[in-house]
Amino acid sequence: MLLEWTMRSLKWSTSHAVFVTEIDDEHKEIFEALVSLQKLLSSRGLSLEIRKQTQRLTACIEAHFAHEERLMRAARYGSLRWHKQQHDNARKRVGQFVLRMEQGETKAGPELLDYLTSWLRYHTRLADRMMGAFLRNQRRGMCKLTFRAGTKPMDACAWVDSNGDTFDPQTNEYGF
């Protein structure tokens, strides 16, 4: 029963998209590896095949996490530590499931699938989407803006854009 539910949940869809092509492609590859492992487990495949597919899955996950972490470091992403902590927790949990599988515990494989399906659903829809938005904005050349509330009227303020050029926010004219 668990394997049937997991199979329905393993299909990648745009609900998992972070709208950064290279990351979405890696997510699709992880989902495909999960589906392959699920098929082997449900058909009671050979333990060697299951082990190879589990290794493929963990390699995909590790490469993906390392790639995301490199992108976040390069972009100076403010939530890198929080995001990396989520990756580290997932690495640890996946490692525990894999160890149990290697020790012959039959429940460990379906539990790994269930854990990763749930984890990926929530991680891609929150943490990865936040990171994706940051990366997309950075790639568009946008910068972090800080707004400070004040008591001065709007026309008493000096307004500048991200390049330091003055502009009038009411008319969108530059160099007033």
Image (cartoon, rainbow, N blue to C red):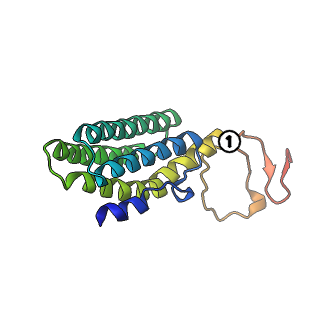
User: In terms of depth relative to the viewer, which is nearer, 127 or 19?
Assistant: 19
Residue 59: % across, % down: 35, 35
Determine which residue is flagged by label 1.
140
Could you tell me which secondary element the residue under label 1 belongs to? loop
Please say if 130 is above or below 49.
below
Tell me the residue at 21%/52% (across/down): 108
Answer left or right for 65 relative to 168: left
Tell me the residue at 36%/65% (across/down): 5
Quarter residue 50 falls in: top left
Please say if 62 is above or below 129.
above
Residue 123: % across, % down: 42, 54
Quarter residue 139 falls in: top right
* The N terminus - image quarter: bottom left
Residue 43: % across, % down: 30, 52
Whether residue 59 is visible = yes
Residue 127: % across, % down: 45, 53
Tell me the residue at 63%/45% (across/down): 137
User: In terms of depth relative to the viewer, which is nearer, 89 or 60?
Assistant: 60
Answer left or right for 133 relative to 176: left
Categorize mark 1 by other alpha carbons within 10 Å: few (<14), some (14-19), many (20+).
Answer: few
Whether residue 79 is visible = no
Please say if 73 is above or below 128.
above
Tell me the residue at 43%/58% (across/down): 121
Say what amino acid the circle numbered 1 marks: Arg
Answer left or right for 172 relative to 98: right
